[in-house]
Image (tube, helix red, strand yellow):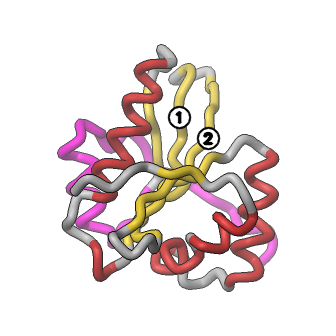
Amino acid sequence: MSADILFAKTEADVRKCWSVFQSLRPNIDEELYLKRMLEMFTEGYTMAYVENESHQPVSAIGFRYLQMLHNGKQIYIDDLTTLPSERGKGYASKLLDYVIDLAKQKGYDCVTLDSGPHRHDAHRLYLNKGFIIASHHFIKTLNP
């Protein structure tokens, strides 16, 4: 696999990646996806993706830079997903390696992410890349 890593810089790029994100977030419709993504870009969110030979996005990662008292400077990965038909081809691994290398280059302390309980293939990837399960993530929904 020699797919280049590309970066979403325009609304058209964000729209182009909709189908990839839909596979991870099926509860979010395209309108809400676009609204939230464009807002998150103003908050420092970065989206990178890879395309197949037909120049269609097949895998994407979204991340941001954070600093927290307990673990210092970090890149937090909000989203990492690959179209179901393209899984197992190394796309997500390539994107994850890119973010890990970026954090190392910046001298950051860690790369962090949350992952749903049923994403076993993703968990295997994270563990193989040296991630550990370090905490439980709690949420209190305010707008059901």
Cα distance in 3D space between marks 2 and 1: 6 Å
* Left or right of residue 3, residue 88 in this image: left
The secondary structure type at the circle numbered 2 is strand
| The quadrant where residue 38 appears | bottom right
Q: Amino acid at mark 1?
A: Ile
Verify whether residue 12 appears in magenta: no
Camera-side residue of 59 and 39: 59
| The quadrant where residue 72 appears | top right
Labels 2 & 1 near each other (Cβ < 8 A): yes
Residue 93 on image: x %, y %:
28, 51
Camera-side residue of 74 and 81: 81
Q: Which residues lie in the magenta part?
A: 115-144
Q: Earlier in the sequence, mark 2 or mark 1?
A: 2
* Left or right of residue 35, residue 103 in this image: left
**Quarter of the image with the C terminus in it:** bottom right
Residue 118 on image: x %, y %:
33, 72
Residue 2 on image: x %, y %:
26, 53
Residue 64, numbered label: 2
